[in-house]
Amino acid sequence: MANEKAKKKKFSFPTAFTVLFIVLVLAAALTWFIPAGSYSKLLYDGDKQVFTITEPDGNEYEMPGTQESLDKLKIKNKIEKFEDGSIYKPIAIPGTYKKVDSQKQGIMEVIKAPVSGVQESIDIILFVFIIGGVIGVLNYTGAFSAGIAALSRATKGREYLLIIFITFLIALGGTTFGMAEETIALYPILIPVFLAAGYDVIVCIAAIYMGSSIGTMFSTVNPFSTVIGSNAAGISFTNGMNFRLAGLVIGIIITLVYILRYAKKVKANPEASMLFAEKEAIEAKFKKEVEAPKLTLRFDLVLLLFLATFVVMIYGVSRLDWWFDEMTALFLVSGILIGIIAGLKEKEFMEQFIGGAADLMGVALVIGMARSINIVLENGLISDTILYTFSNAVKGMNPNVFIVVMLGIFIILGFFINSSSGLAVLSIPIMAPLADTVGLPRDVIISAYIYGMGLISFITPTGLILASLEMVDVTYDKWLKFIMPLMGIIAVFSAIMLLIQVNF
């Protein structure tokens, strides 16, 4: 028995931190083998009404902020998109790639990168800490346990409705306003609900994370991907909308069928769970007793306030251009009000708030580590080289082969540039004109871009998945085992959708 335990311990999968550090070292190694290079970048200054051009060697000069300047630079955008702020980030100028001095990332750069990653991610890290504090207070009041018990009783026999409702709702947020980082707040809330319903943690992660991923992958009006990408391509974001909308509907159905099949198997036989070996430890941490106190007026007010916080957050992000500063302040105020309504004393409140924030320390550090990988790649100046190499490789291809290859290229680029808006402004001005050369409309490039970015988000360590897994104590290998078959299915489906868009 002792030997079996030792063997199991010996072959256990490394933590999220180790996985990220390995990827960080590999990213640094790439900067020693891939030549450094850069495109000239264009940024619009609305106050002066000029374009500032930054060349690969760092030299800057200005051009009039007019349509004539854009035409001269062969940038297929309307000046109005710059003037109204639709394009607000520096965009790559086609045909300006140049090699620059190598920026190899060595041992010191690797050591300092996690520190810089935490510094640059402090907004989302603070958001995570505040959420942890609020959850700590909410759990202590007893209102959360009472609400879970009531929800479990209400859905008894129809627990699958939880999966459908949550996946669909989050996918809706993803396709409309890019709901992604905001979902971090949902895991501590929903995991006990799913456990009480007889499912495992993988089902909860899949409903939340894949709802967000499918929504953002098949974006319709998401300003951070479809809109900014279409603007960079010089077309309306409504071009190709029907194909993406059809992809969204079918993609949600495929995802739900996959999750529901697994969930049904786990509910019927808990030993079928990929996390059965960790079942007791996970339930000890997350599962709330269903014999919880009954809902009282005070509990109702606390839970309604907490629910209203999410409603306000979604409205603020989608309508008022809120980001992490505003969302963090919102949850901080919500936590204080919950403490007041619940009648907690000041010391009592602070102990629970700080304890809840401390529970998410690991998640916060994972976020900083993930950002450190992007920092090394950016400082190594190899992303533009990879883009330049790929753009040359697809010139003159058959349209059908071209668009499938473009999907693969955006999957790879999505790993190196893990930001939908960042990837759009860098790659679309380069890639969109290539569609012209093979006789395709530019909206198919936008579809390939969001599909590729979405697919790699299922598994990329530089994205949100490791932070999500760290929050729920699930190792990366278990997620890969669960998600890879679905990823393959969605990849084939995406390629089919692109071929249909090309030929119709």
Image: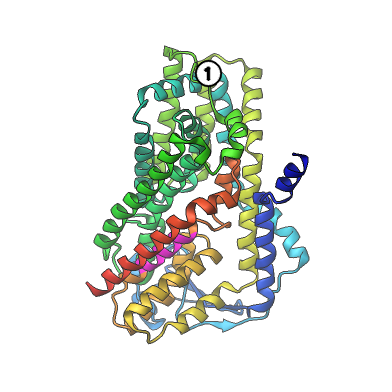
Query: Where is residue 314 drawn, in percent x and y?
Result: 40, 40
The residue under the point 55% across, 66% down is 416
Is residue 287 depicted above or below 17 in this figure?
above
Membership of 144 in magenta stretch? no
Local packing at callout 1 (Cα closer than 10 Å; few below 14, some 14-19, many 20+) is some
Q: Is residue 64 left or right of residue 378?
A: left
Q: Quadrant of residue 69?
A: bottom left
Q: Depth check: give the residue in front, 372 or 41.
A: 372
Q: Quadrant of the C terminus?
A: bottom left
Magenta region, main secondary structure:
helix
Q: Is residue 403 left or right of residue 7?
A: left
- Can residue 84 be seen here? no
The residue under the point 40% across, 39% down is 264
Q: Residue furthest bottom?
A: 396
Amino acid on which the number 1 mark rests in the picture: Gly
Q: Quadrant of residue 405?
A: bottom left
Q: Quadrant of the N terminus?
A: top right
Q: Is residue 326 left or right of residue 374?
A: left
Q: Depth check: give the residue in front, 430 or 214.
A: 214
**Magenta span:** 446-456
Secondary structure under badge 1? Answer: loop
Query: Where is residue 48 drawn, in percent x and y?
Result: 45, 66
Q: How is the image coloured?
A: rainbow
Q: Depth check: give the residue in front, 207 or 318.
A: 207
Membership of 451 in magenta stretch? yes
Q: Which residue is mark 1?
A: 142
Q: Residue furthest front?
A: 1
Query: Where is residue 53 drawn, in percent x and y?
Result: 50, 75
Is residue 56 depicted above or below 206 in this figure?
below
The residue under the point 35% across, 40% down is 164
- Can residue 17 be seen here? yes
Query: Where is residue 453 drawn, in percent x and y?
Result: 45, 62
